[in-house]
Amino acid sequence: MSSILNLVKQKIGKPYEDLEFLLECFREVLLESNAPELAKLLPWINPAPEHIQFRKRDIQLYSIAFQFLNLVEINAAVQERRRQEEEHSLSAVNGLWAQNLLKLKDAGLSQEQIVSLLGNMRIEPVLTAHPTEAKRTTVLEHQRELYLLLVKRENQMYTQAEQEEIRREIKLCIERLWRTGEIFLEKPDVMSELRGILYYLMNVFPEVIPILDRKLVQAWKSIGFDEELLKNSNVYPKITFGNWVGGDRDGHPLVTAEVTKDTLRLLRFDALVVIRRQLSKLVKELSFSYVYEKATEKMRLRIKEMIAELGEEGEQAFARNHGEVFRQYVNLMMAKLPIDVKREHATELKDEAGKYRYAKELLADLFLLQESLITYGSKSIAYAEVHDTIRLVQTFGFRLARLDIRQNSRFHDLAIAQLMKAASQDGDAFLEWSEQERIAFFNQELQSQRPFTHPNMSLEKEAQAVTDVYKVLSEHIQKYGHYGIGSLIVSMTRNVADLLAVYIFVREAGLLHEEAGELACPLHVVPLFETIEDLQRSKEIMEVFLNHPFTKRSLAYQQQINGYTRPLQQIMVGYSDSNKDGGILASAIALYKAQQELVGVGKKYGIDIQFFHGKGGTISRGAGPTHWFLQALPFGSINGNIRLTEQGETIAQKYANKMNAVYNLELLVSGATCQSILHHFVKEEPYPFLSTLERLAEESKKFYTDLVHDADFIQFFSEATPIDAIEESKIGSRPARRTGKRSLADLRAIPWVFSWSQTRYHLTSWYGVGYALEKLMKENTASFEELKKSVKSDVFVRYILTNVDTSLAATDEEIMNNYAQLVKSKAVREKIWQSIVNELRRTKEMLTLLLGRPLEERRTNHYYSNLLRASAMEELHYNQIEMLKLWRWQKAEGLSKDAENTLLGVLLTINGIAGALRHTG
């Protein structure tokens, strides 16, 4: 066994004993498979090899070892939270319901004040499939199975013989994982990505929601609050889900109107499958002998209505379970679900008379069931099983997740110009118009329902693509209502005209609502402010947009059809491009200020602002501890509503295993709820550190942009990182560049971050921070000292600096230098490398000054986990560098077959390193 594993076991203990156990099982699998030479290469339980050329199987071996490490650490975290709750109290775990409710109670809020706002909370994680998930779905399934077996092994009830059987099952699972290909040989299509998302929506989240509700009740009681206040299902925070797969077409030509149509159909069908599954469970639980004649009058009347609506099918449903009226009632609900069922399996949608059209109709029947059970005297069932069913329908509806439609503002420009041409207008002139000219044109156009085009008219590419998808939305809304459609998001929103253009597309599809001769849009039109410049202009843009007559009418109509208490405007803010644009400090401060100003705009116009946070899986793209992230948001910015993306590998990390999924969703829901309620009742105080942080942001941005805009930087980036291999990978269906140009501006933020993390630079999450801090220390000692004191007391400052600190801990100067040697030009290499390494050292020094103690003392678990990972990653980096050299040479020499084979090895190292780091981009 390696000395590093022994050291980590001594310092941390249990999880790394589990790691050793899994590696020993893997060793046995390899020996039994006649692969003793591979068994000798297993990291951590063998001496480290001396820089050998890895074969593809060697790389996969390391990749699986890192998967083991990730699994045991997740399991250890779950067990540690249980231990803290058992030995101390429910409030001992940071960021969960008990601690957050206690915080509200300590702030002087009564249980009545808290419960009055609980049910107004709307929290929506939005699942996306950007090319950040480097694992195949099959591999994820094997990992989930292995995790469950690891948990099972913890149970002390099993005999030695049973433990041996569990060990045998673990070995079989490891063998399946070993024999399953690690990487995509072909790019997955959008529907394959959708199936990955559907797994969580159908099999994980429906099980998590009732557990989350019970944890709220337990926490509520634990701090002395009255459980009776939580008996009404409507007082719980409203959790729903969003989805981008099949709707996000920004730079993604494979997301066609047909794909969107199929996605909407599949989401509706699978939602009904989930609901039918729950109703089937409910039927089994309601086995009370209680005849129809004894049911409440309201229930008897509703049963008669349902039978009449369903005809013969209703009579057959009611005939089952004679003398058990509650079961008969649920049988009728199941019969009214608009799906065709053959041999107890749902096969297709069945839209016909007598069936439910909307989920709210089913909810009304469920509330009647709950009321009838309470009258009957079975309150426990009413507040348990029926409550769980109500919550499931409230969460998933007949849509499973709302589908957002996202497209780039430039694509929309071309589509408008082409629509004008089709209507014999000067579309080319539109592309040259100023913003004010465009707004004047849209104002005139939006006075009537008349579209630019007529059905079946042949259009140019962009106009055809846009009008086709809006027609799909129109057809879906006509059949099923607007409930399955999320937001119409305009990425790279530059001005008000970009948003008004969407109203034109809605008009083309015949979707505008007309009342008293005035038009309104039923769907949310949402800006996405991504660059630092656009974030800085967001207040000005939204002032004009929210004051526009068409927007005012649209928000009022949306309030009416959605049942909002006030008009609501969603605004999406982007963490990835703003970071790529100006570095981590400038991005964080621009996002904070923009949200602060936009909250003010909402107050000015009496509109609730719902922020939609476009976060990724790395610190450079907005990742960080959920509870700290929520606490670090500007005052009043949650205000009862929050959406945020869950991207790529973060979905598997957070939600693949049920109890981990409960924990991560509880962090989000309880944290957002606590912040929102607290800010509702307490007075806002001026933020004291903003001017200092703005100064730091300005200095760090200048220093960062000086580097990335250096004439030689792109050459360094292109040669010192595996960006070219990442662009060739088959990980996701989306292209790495928006238009295919080789420029920093055109490169997506995800592969940009992915490339820097692969090489252990993590440049985007620290570069410029050290320079700005050192400059502040030298020029304004008092401000620097105040900042130093604020680290302990100010959550926003601590959140930013801790995230930078986490990234610095993952850097490795020696490995970074090895990648720098790939740059052919010595002059370019030495110039850019020196700038980077100097700033790395300076940033580490400044962070140690501010945070007081080294990482080893402050975050022991994190430090030793990194140490263990780094010891095994060295070989993967060495092999990646060697293979990159060979692959690039083979391509240059025209040896395409050899290059293709070598690329597969490079991609395996990318997978292995991504697994070791626990993120890609």
Image (spheres, rainbow, N blue to C red):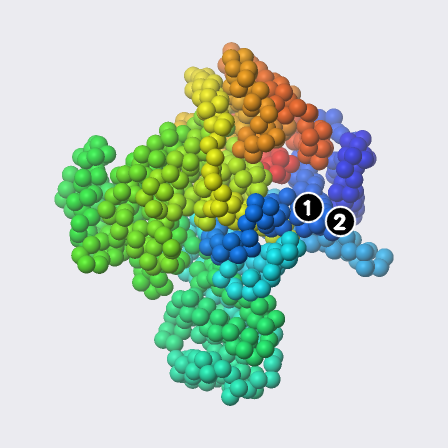
Three-letter code, disc 2: Glu
- Residue 787 sits above or below residue 325 on the image: above
Q: Quadrant of residue 326?
A: bottom right
Asked if disc 1 and disc 2 are in contact, CB closer than 8 Å, the reply is yes
* Sequence order check, earlier mark of 1 and 2: 2
Q: Secondary structure at mark 1?
A: helix
For the point 38% across and 55% down, the residue is 565
Three-letter code, disc 1: Ala
For the point 64% across and 22% down, the residue is 848
Q: Is residue 15 visible?
A: yes
Percent coordinates x, y for residue 181 in the rendering: 61, 46
- Residue 402 sits above or below residue 413 on the image: below
> Is 611 situated left or right of 813 in this image?
left
Residue linked to disc 1:
92
User: Going by the picture, which residue comes out furthest to the right?
Assistant: 160
Residue linked to disc 2:
87
> Is 527 situated left or right of 577 in this image?
left
For the point 47% across and 66% down, the residue is 272
Q: Is residue 844 visible?
A: no
Percent coordinates x, y for residue 538 in the rendering: 35, 35
